[in-house]
Amino acid sequence: MIPFFGAALADDGDRVTYGSDRRNPFTLRFTDPRLEEEYERDLGAADRRRLRVASVSAIAIWVVAALVGPPLFGVDRAPVDIAAISVIGMNLLLLTLLYSRPTTLRAQRRLLLFINMFSVVAVLVVITTSGVPLSIAAPAVILTFMFTFPQRVAFPAALVDGVFHVLAYGVFAGWVRGGPDIVFNVFLVASAIAIGLIAIRLLEDSERSSYAQARVVADLHRRVDRLLHQYLSPDVAQVLIDDPARADLGGEAVDVTVLFADLQGFTPFSERTPPADVVAMLNAAFGEAVPAIFAEGGTIIQFAGDAVVAVFNAPVRQHDHALRAARAALALQASTARLPAPTDAPRFRVGLNTGPALVGNIGSAELRNFVAIGDTTNLAARLQTFAAPGTVVIGQRTRTMLGGAAHVRDLGEPELKGKSAVGRIYELLGLEARGVP
């Protein structure tokens, strides 16, 4: 479970769902071991960077203390050097583990906790044996605890470390210093460390909440992205994700090649076939047609019953859009022809036409579609009605753009319903392997 704004999220496979809060209120750890493991793994790199910074800083401070402390305070160098060498050695060991051995983050934190405890003991022993002024004991203890901030020690470990610091200082103050102000001094150290522990808890809680929120956002993004790509052509979906303003109503005039494919004989087939079998046939046919169109960068703008309409050169520009559409049409026919089906099953008829169209979004503020409107689209639909099942018919402009790459059969200048002037049309038989120069 992943807590998020007072609730929680259950990671169900690839999906994050909402549920009750299941985070340990004391340790802040996720109660689901798998999610806790993912949290540590995902934040492991950042934690290792922080550990490196903290270790290097500790080494630098102890080096300065060993070099400057004895002459500055006029004290014995030996205890300071021994303590410095010990703490520096342990921090170097931690750095070696961070850079070389693939130890777990939990093991590194245990070693870090030991180093912190050893450091405060070393500081107090140095103050006791070397003649360093006793007045610096309290700030020195607080300073050693402050390293838990860049180290980002988990809150339970930080609590153990803080209690140990307070107890160590209390023993030191009672044994070495004495006097009526000992309780007050211990209180000041304990208060400072308590405030630090509160800050550590708040930081970890915030980090875990941010992690949970990021998981929610990532999951929502995956689902929205998946839905967009299932209900829109990939290019349209990507354009909307990259530039949401492209979803505004309106459009632009663009030269496009429109592919119009329709299953001939679908109506009588659906009359004599159970609905479930009709749906299965449609899904199988579109399951072959759609990948063929997408493989050439086509944008499907409509499923209309048993028909599919695609456009090339919009929304992404393609200088060879006619060739892409021709390859897609031939691949569509070839792949659907291989489907196991009865001899009377519907077959696609395909019409291709190239020309200007108004490409953009049409509809209302609540619902809109990406379309290509104009005579180019209408003629592609009419060419489809003239095609025989399993064939591709192209218009004159498409034929011109394909040039010598296309193998065609001249079909003349037929009269098509609703069109006064069509021009010559052709059946596309094949394409040269090298395409258009």
Image (tube, rainbow, N blue to C red):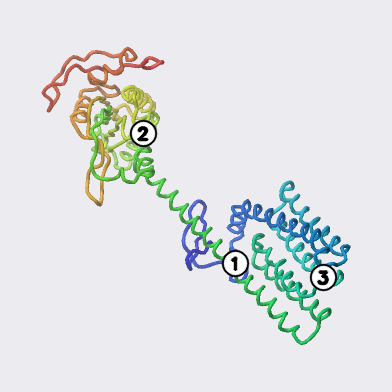
Q: Which residue, given by chain and number where applicable, does mark 1 sit on?
A: 28
Residue 94 place in picture, x, y as percent: 75, 54
Q: Nearer the viewer, mark 2 or mark 3?
A: 3
Residue 30 place in picture, x, y as percent: 58, 63
Q: CA distance from mark 2 to mark 3?
A: 81 Å
Residue 24 place in picture, x, y as percent: 59, 68
Above or below residue 227? Residue 253 is: above
Where disc 1 sits, the SS reads loop
Above or below residue 275? Residue 114 is: below
Residue for point 69% across, 63% down: 147
Q: Which residue, given by chain and number where applicable, does mark 3 sit on?
A: 132
Assign the N terminus to one quadrant of the image.
bottom right
Q: Earlier in the sequence, mark 1 or mark 3?
A: 1
Q: Nearer the viewer, mark 1 or mark 3?
A: 3
Q: Are marks 1 and 3 in contact (CB under 8 Å)?
A: no
Where disc 2 sits, the SS reads helix
Q: Earlier in the sequence, mark 2 or mark 1?
A: 1
In the image as oriented, which residue stretches furthest toward the left?
420
Above or below residue 171? Residue 249 is: above
Return the mark for residue 290: 2
Residue 357 placement, left or right of 9: left
Is disc 1 surrounded by few (<14), some (14 to 19) or many (20+) residues within 10 Å?
A: some
Residue for point 26% across, 16% down: 400
Where disc 3 sits, the SS reads loop
The amino acid sitting under disc 3 is Val
Q: Nearer the viewer, residue 71 or 122?
A: 71
The amino acid sitting under disc 1 is Leu
Q: Nearer the viewer, mark 2 or mark 1?
A: 1
